Image: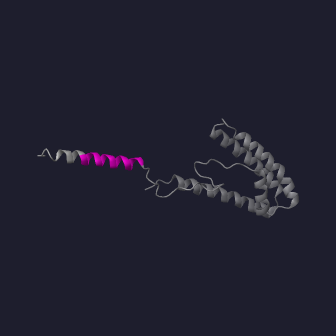
Amino acid sequence: MFRKSSIPLVVAATIALCALSSARAAEPAPHPKPIPPPATGVVTPNSGLPAFDAGKRLAALTEQLKLTPVQQAEMKPVLEDTETKVKAARAPGTPPSAALDKVKSILDGADIQIRVILDGAQKEEWERMKEDVKNANRRTFKTAATPVR
């Protein structure tokens, strides 16, 4: 089948192929498209709940609900108290399900206090804002849970 003179050629070719394949294996293959990190403040299924920041929340509510200076002064302690309670509920070592239940309860209590501060049109806008957040969260997790085909 093989001549004695062809054996060194086969051995040399095998060695060359092994060297070539090991050289290719040593080079990491470049990723075709780098995956950027999620934008700041965007909730993803793996990022958990965003932190409650009373100052940012007051600024956003002032802009969206057109709060008067008096309303801002009334709203600030409510939001600061809520921030403190939410941080305590999310303390390290707290099981996520327990933390979620506590945070929901805290936010429900804050919602009652906030509605007392708002006037009629602001209350309607507040309810619309809450509904938008609820719908956005449903879309985020619904699309994240959709299987890839």
Q: Nearer the viewer, residue 35 or 69?
A: 35
User: Total marks drawn?
Assistant: 0
Q: Nearer the viewer, residue 84 or 11?
A: 11
Is 4 displayed left or right of 139 in the figure? left
Is 40 displayed left or right of 75 in the figure? left
Give residue 88's position: percent from left, percent from top.
73, 40
Residue that appears at 77% across and 43% down: 84
| Dominant secondary structure (helix, strand or loop) of the stretch shown in magenta | helix
Give residue 105's position: percent from left, percent from top.
72, 44
Judged from this view, the residue extending furthest toward the right is 70
Q: Colour scheme used in the picture? A: one colour
Q: Where, quadrant-wise, is the C terminus in this rendering? A: bottom left
Give residue 6's position: percent from left, percent from top.
16, 47
Give residue 112's position: percent from left, percent from top.
78, 51
Is 133 displayed left or right of 116 in the figure? left
Region in magenta: 12-26
Residue that appears at 85% across and 57% down: 71
**Up/down of 2 relative to 56, above or below:** above
Is 133 covered by the magenta stretch? no
Judged from this view, the residue extending furthest toward the top is 93
Residue that appears at 65% across and 48% down: 49
Q: Quadrant of residue 115?
A: bottom right
Is 126 displayed left or right of 70 in the figure? left
